[in-house]
Image (cartoon, rainbow, N blue to C red):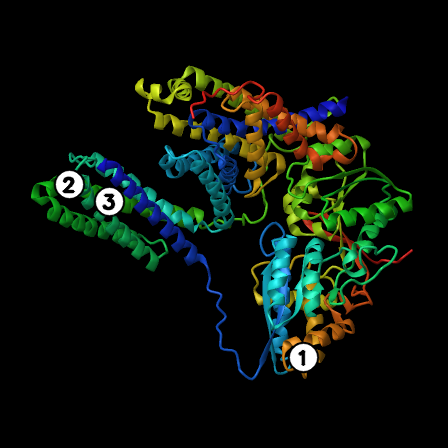
Amino acid sequence: MDQFFQQLVNGLTLGSLYALIAVGYTVVYGIVQLINFAHGEVFMIGAFGALTTYLLFFDGQTGLWILPVMLIGAVIASVGTAVLMERVAYRPLRNAPRLAPLITAIGISVFLQEFVRIFYERPNWTVPVLVALSVGVAWVVAARLTTVSLNHPITKWQDREPLIVAAVVATVIWAGARLSAPDLSFLVSAGVVVGGVVLGTAAGFLVARLRGGATRSQALTRSLVAITAVSTVLMELGWLIYKELIASIEWPSAKQRIPFPQIDVVTGQALQVGGVTIQRSAVFTILALAICSVLLWYFINRTRLGRGMQAVSQDPDTARLMGINVDRIIVVAFALGAALAAVAGISQGFQNNNIEFRMGFLAGLKAFTAAVLGGIGNIQGALLGGLVLGVVETLATQYIPGQFGGSSWKDVWAFAILILVLVFRPQGLLGARVVDRA
Amino acid sequence: MGGTVQQRSVVRVGASLIVASLALTACGSRSGDDNGGGSDSSTKTAKIGVIAPLSGDLSALGLGIQHSVELAVKQANDSNAIPGWKLEVDAKDDEAKPDVGKNAATALASDANVIGVVGTLNTSTSQQVQPVLAPKNIVQVSPANTGPGLTQGADWQKNPKRPYPTYFRTCTTDAVQGPFAARYLFETAKITKVATIHDKKAYGQGLAGTFTEEFKKLGGQVVAAETINPDDAQFTAVISAIKPSAPQAVYYGGEYPQAGPLSQQMKAAGLNVPLMGGDGIYDPKFIQLGGKSSTNDLATSVGAPVDTLPSAKKFVEDYNAAGFKEPYAAYGGYSYDAANAIINALKTSLKDAKDVESARQATVDALGKVSFDGVTGKVSFDQYGDTTSKVLTVYKVDAAKWATVETKDFETK
């Protein structure tokens, strides 16, 4: 009997992991009817985000207080990836045939895997990202400082061009200076900032003058100075971060499994309850699922955004008429799933003690199965489906004897359950909550 | 409508900028490894191929193989070991997958300058590589294949028969390694109850099979036999399944990417017994993945420890002096010996040869008669192409390092 409870605990642990990932599939499907096959990679990037945070700030330490920081790092990485993915890959395909976003999802999934595999040990890809971020922030600041509408429906390029030219000139000066003098020195920094501001502003002013005349260029001067100053200062700051923090660390190669940091309390000696051994990471995973599902329930049912999500999933057109910003709700759905996947990524790291760039593939497939098992589009269904799938897998390992038993057949039994459910109860265990409007 | 079109073009320009900058950084970080052409017209070129996993989980072992061969070839070229000939290394990645290895072998076999191949790491890959290289008479010397069937045929226990005369290896086989581990556990460590787990690959299954047979013959008890999938990362279910049978040790047939996490998860689940494996887990990465609790885990590996043999000191020094980025790993010594065995054979076969293709058969014949003192001991081959040396070593994890426990000659009983 101990053995049964032992495998039950193992199964619930595994199932909690699947459940946390499955929510991401189900929420996104419920709102945009898209199977986001790249969600497994979001989970993988969550784990890598946690590892990155650990390597950046706490390498070698094991205190429990690191855990929340790692969680934040993981969530930022996952949510950032998911939101960017939605913006770049799915939003342009919003009205395309269903197959197009599905294939895009598979493409994104391969891209993310390969990106982590190739670039994790070469952090210089962060430099263009930091530069792009700096210019982006500078743009926002500059846009606030002018009375000219940069989104004017007819003439916006006329007003944007000076700002873009100023930013590009400042960036080019910065890049040229830093390529020739990559070492940190105050003199170069000051030169870059002053030179960038003067030359960038001058170039921008010239363009403004040529395109819009004297009054326009007057109105844009403040923004021009702001965009060059903010972007050069932020780029220098980014370079400092890159040099001092990112480039100073020996990044492990993601082409092999990377050991995951071990944290006090959540990893270590297993707990013994009667005859059942419970690993600390299992407690962490199950607790994480419990807390996340309570928060999720609160978010969906008690907040404005959550109710907006429900409305959009029932009828997006009417929801739009009621004043709900559907695009924002979709982003929130992606972010929500990604945050839970990040928690799952950390749990998996603690449980298996290692992470790798391929870990999202099978986990994603299993979580998708769990979502379908519980009824796709149904959040409670995803949680239940994950737990059922995990328990079936472990019990099959233990109790199916002979040729078809044992650990190597566990995936087969997990998918066999899926087939049985789909044959006899196609809407899933708790019923799919999707209005079919294809 | 004009607005959306313009917005699209912003996205397009932005996306292409990002792609361009990524491409630039990628290019910037790649070091130019152009060796520069212009070979001397009076010297002819012969290539020694390498087929090993240069990327993926097992790349630590594969890159060690590649660099060790490069070292041997460089030394041969520097000392002008084969007058009139210049040797080159052509390393191909097999990703530890049999089908990729087969493609690599096909590419090498179609190159008229290839005279021999060092590789592969995995037994299952060699099974695909052998039939490609054999018809072209290209010698293959593996530093790491331990599957007995490769040299003695599928029915190697009852009716050994050499399938490919072009295949040789510098390491001993599972026919020796599994029983050696069984004898160590039963006779030296006084363990009578073990559980076995393997990953169903040719190497793992063979190792676990020969281990089980010998352990039972000695009078020990195999209380549980389980398998895992080669891609698994989560082993709690299988650990819980074997735990109630209370084994005193777990014997694992497979490689370190699974063995490390398996050991860690075993201990975390309260199964505090040593995990023992073959040469596939004898790697620093195993300890890194297994964490602190991997202390006292055991591994057997072929030959005597490379860094203790006097003949190996020079190899280690030269390797470190050559400045390779990756360490020589578990099979560096065997790869160096394998490359030198080929080079030794080439000394006789290439001497008067017009071109590489006509010298291939002579190389196969010469390699069978090679005999010299290598890094890992005496290098020579028996009638099946197996190494004549049957020395094995037991290692134990101690203070996050592999420490030698005992080195022994395996005697057939």
Q: Amino acid at mark 2?
A: Leu
The C terminus of chain A lies in quadrant:
top left
> Please, is residue B274 above or below residue A303 in the view?
below
Alpha-carbon distance for marks 2 and 1?
A: 78 Å
Name the front one of labels 3 and 1: 1
- Check disc 2 and report its element: helix, strand or loop: helix
State the mark number for residue A229. 3
- Check disc 1 and report its element: helix, strand or loop: loop
Question: Which residue lies at the image location 16% right of the left edge and 39% below the top edge?
Answer: A155
Lower position in the chain sequence, tag 3 or tag 2: 2
Between A150 and B9, the one nearer to me in the picture: B9
- Please state the chain letter of the residue tagged with numbered disc 1 in the rendered image: B
Q: Amino acid at mark 3?
A: Ala
- Please state the chain letter of the residue tagged with numbered disc 3 in the rendered image: A
State the mark number for residue A220. 2
> Please, is residue B263 above or below residue A124 in the view?
above
| Residue A138, x across and y down, in percent | 27, 41
Q: Is residue B333 visible?
A: no
